[in-house]
Each structure stands twice: as C-alpha cells, then as structure tokens.
Image (tube, helix red, strand yellow):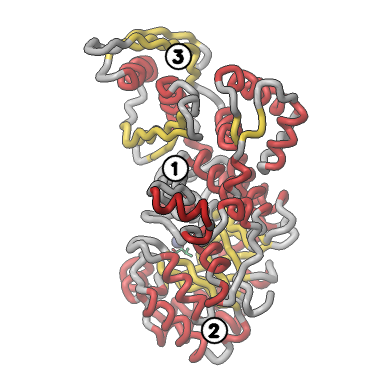
Amino acid sequence: MTSNSVVIFDTTLRDGEQSPGASMTRDEKLRIAKMLERLQVDVIEAGFAMASQGDFESVKAVATTIKNSTVCSLSRALDGDIDRAAEALKPAESGRIHTFIATSPIHMKYKLQMEPDKVIEQAVHAVKRARNQCADVEFSCEDAGRSELEFLCRIIEKAINAGARTINIPDTVGYALPHEFGETINQLLTRIPNSDKAIFSVHCHNDLGLAVANSLSAVVNGARQVECTINGLGERAGNASLEELVMGLRTRNDSLQLDTRIATEHIVPASRMVSSITGFPVQPNKAIVGANAFAHESGIHQDGVLKHRETYEIMKAEDVGWNTNKMVLGKLSGRNAFKTRMEELGISFETKEDLNETFKRFKSLADKKRDIYDADLHSLVADSLEMDETFKLDALSISSEMGGTPEARVVLSVNNERNEIISTGDGAVDAAFKAIEAIACSCAQLELYSVNAITSGTDSQGEVTVRLARKGRIVNGSGADTDVIIASAKAYVHALNLLEAGEKRNPQTGSI
Ligand code: KIV
Ligand code: ZN
C-alpha cells in the first residue's frame, strides 16, 4: 500500500447492521460480502463474533468465502471476545481482529467505571492477546472524538508497542468538526513517537452530517484508512458513506492526490443490494447512488449537459455503475442468461433448486413487466431468501372505489394452516394490513411504511418497506411487486416472519 492509497474498511455488516431494523441473516451477509469483495474493498468487518451465535456463524462464513479482502471481526478488549473473534476468523485467508475500548473521560467514568491507567492496561493486554492469535490487529479508541489528546497519545503509543498495526480514531458520537478532527490526526501522528509503525484510521459517525467531511479532513492530515458503509448505513445517523468517500477521493484527486483500489462501477449495484436486503430505501437526492444523482431537471442544465457533459457533471454516471442498471432481460430470456446476469450482479445460487425457484419468480415477473432491470433482479432474490416462514401470504384481493370504503380479502397460512378474512380500512393498504393482523395477532407496532418505485415507468415494481417493533425488537420487512398493495402485504408478512425468526437476529450488537 503506497502512501497515497487509502485503505477502505467497510463496516456495513457490523456498524451498518446496528441501524434499527437492519440486522441481516448469515446468507444476506454473505451476499453483501461477495459484493464488497467485487468492489475490491480492502477490509470487510463481517460482524462482532462474540455478540451471538448468529454473528459468530456469519463472521465465520464470510471468512471462509472471501479471498480477496481481509475479513475482520470486532471484539471488546476482553479475553473472551478476542478468542471468539480469532476462532471465527480461523478460515480466513487474511483475517483481522479489531479490538476496542473507550478512552473519553465520560465513557471511562460512567460506562467503564475504570481509572485511565487501568484502561491502558486492559488495552495493551487485549492487543497482545489478539496478536498472539492473529498477525493483523486493529485497536480503536472508542469516543476518541471526545477524548483528551494527551491520553490518546499515551494509550496509542502503548497499543502500537503491543502489536497493533492499525490505530482507529472513531468519532463515535459524530461530534467532531472537520478542521478540529483533521488537527487531532495531525497531532497524533506528530506527537506519538512510534506513529510510523501503524496505519492511522478514522471511523466517523454522521450525527451532524459531517462524517464524510471529517474523514476527508483526517486523510488530508495523514490518516490512511477510512471506515465506512454502503449508503452510509450505521448506528443512529449512520457512518461515513463509502460511495461518497471513494468518489470524493477519486474526483478530487487533483487536489488530494489520494485514491483507493475500489472498482467504482460496482457502487450502484452494491447500494441497491444493501438497500433491498436491509429495507432502507436510498433517498433520491443521495449523492452518487440516489436516483436523481445524475438527473438534470432544469432546462438550462439539460441544455448544458447535451452540449458538453462536464458543464454540469463532475463524475460519469457509468463510472459508478449506473449504466449497469439498464434493461438486460425479458420474458424470452433463458435460464442461462438469467444465471449469468445474476452472477454479474454478485448473486450466486447454492443449489440448483434455489436457481430454479428464483428463475420461476423471474418468469412470473416478466409476464407482468416487459423490461426487467438489475434492480428488479435484486428484489427477486430478496423475495426468495425468505427464512422459515411462519406466515405465508396465499392470496389477496382488494375492492376499492372512489368515495367508498376499501375492502381486503386475505388468505394467510399460519404454520401451514389456511385462514381467510375480510377487513375494511382507511385505504387499501390499511385494509390489507388490518386483515393480516386479524389473522396473525402479532401485537407488533407499525413504525414505518415506505414505498419506492424500483425503476422508472408506470410498470415499475413498487418496493415497500414495513418496519415493525415488538418487545424491543425492530425489523424491516420488504416486498416488491408491480402491484403496490401486494408489495405492501408481502412486506408486512416478511416483517412478521422476521419477528418470528428472532433467534436468527442479533439483539446484542445494537448495544455497543
Ligand atoms: O463508533 C465506534 O466507536 C465504533 C467502534 C466500535 C469502532 O463503532
Ligand atoms: Zn461506529
């Protein structure tokens, strides 16, 4: 890695998963990990092995499968965590243990209830223990953004001596300002006598909308790893977004003279995949990956772009993968073309049955919708990766007329037992949800309902996200269909199944 290369450390599968409702199954994590490998992400943080058996299995599965990126597990600075991370990473071609402890006065006093010297002692012990099991160790000073510089210098010098190769400076609560945060990195690199023995990294949260700006300010001041997530997913307001950081570095290489090894043409497919798996839609005006990121509305702009693209565009849409979102398949496409395109999108099938089942869904979609786009293909897989289904939507019909009260007839199987009910509601979606609830009796709270058109055109599939909460657990169900009411019902049922399959979810990572 040369000094003008910035290491991209993606934490979509760990910090990203800490977004409320964004928890993912092992198979979903594997699909995203394969996409991240395709993107040529340097380090994939696959999870927090100690958090649960499910997280352990996910880290292990990613470590077994991924060959061209380093696979990392988070661990607190505790023996049990470190050993568990090492165990999960055993199959990795290149593995990293990422251990952390809080260093800010407020965290040490109230959360850890430890004296600063004890914190240093525990950090050094943790790094040494990790190094005994893994050559590549990263040490993070949690809440570094609010930690004292002197204390950071002391603990980091010792962590490097204990064997940490990467030192991460998280702005855990998204409090920093770009000029301040850049100066902190500069001071650390200047004052710590052995700072040249480690790569300095940053991990910025977006509470003030400054995560990317703070990260860029840090690299300008010498940081050479940035931690980020696809679509900026992450705890609370999220993390620095991978696509914005990477394109910021690439587009402004003239000024920054820094770059990454990211294969940017996979950015949009990766964004779509993460959005469809987590049920977090991408806002249309989101930089790089939003539907409007390269759309020109005003006549003056359109005229300018037609005359000379660079008048209003600083990046090429195709460089970030927008052109791969073109129509590729239709009703007459065969199984081979389907499988090939899916593989190009980073989606592979473990068994012939999985392929056949998804191909069947593709054919039935192609019967309803003439043009099948990549985004449609992603939603097909999301549909087919249903976990054990307690609830199954067998039929739905709606009768609705202007000025009348909509009525929904729903047939829903619960553990293979067929139930049928008719409900009315304030609108067709409300009627459908009420009918499903009347059968499921889930006692879940509907926290969010959102509809997004997957592609442009009136034949677009509607992609619906339904967020349900029950007993402190939050899940995002998603459903796609050319009929928005059916998509909504599918999303509701998906969310109910996610609630039921609670043991596959990971309640503990949210508490880091
Ligand atoms: O935000 C944070 O401080 C973290 C650490 C565990 C790296 O996510
Ligand atoms: Zn974080």
SS at mark 1 in the image: loop
301 vs 54, nearest the viewer: 301
* Label 2 Cα neighbours within 10 Å, binned few <14 / some 14-19 / many ≥20: some
Give, as a three-letter code, the residue at label 3: Leu
Q: Where, by quadrant of the figure, is residue 334 drawn?
A: top right
Whether residues under marks 1 and 2 lie with C-beta atoms below 8 angstroms apart, the answer is: no
Residue 3 in picture, x, y percent from top left: 64, 80
Residue 364 in picture, x, y percent from top left: 61, 18
Looking at the image, is 419 positioned above or below residue 49? Answer: above
Q: Is residue 50 visible?
A: no
Name the residue beneath numbered marker 2.
Answer: 158
Q: Which mark's residue is nearer the viewer, 1 or 2? A: 1
Marks 1 and 2, how far apart at CA = 40 Å
Give, as a three-letter code, the residue at label 1: Phe
Give, as a three-letter code, the residue at label 2: Lys
Name the residue beneath numbered marker 3.
Answer: 412
Q: On the rendered structure, is 445 left or right of 92? A: left
At 39% from the left edge and 74% from the top edge, which residue is drawn? 178
Looking at the image, is 133 positioned above or below residue 276? Answer: below
Q: On the rendered structure, is 443 left or right of 79? A: left
At 71% from the left edge and 30% from the top edge, which residue is drawn? 338
The answer to which of marks 3 and 1 sits earlier in the sequence is: 1
Name the residue beneath numbered marker 1.
Answer: 280
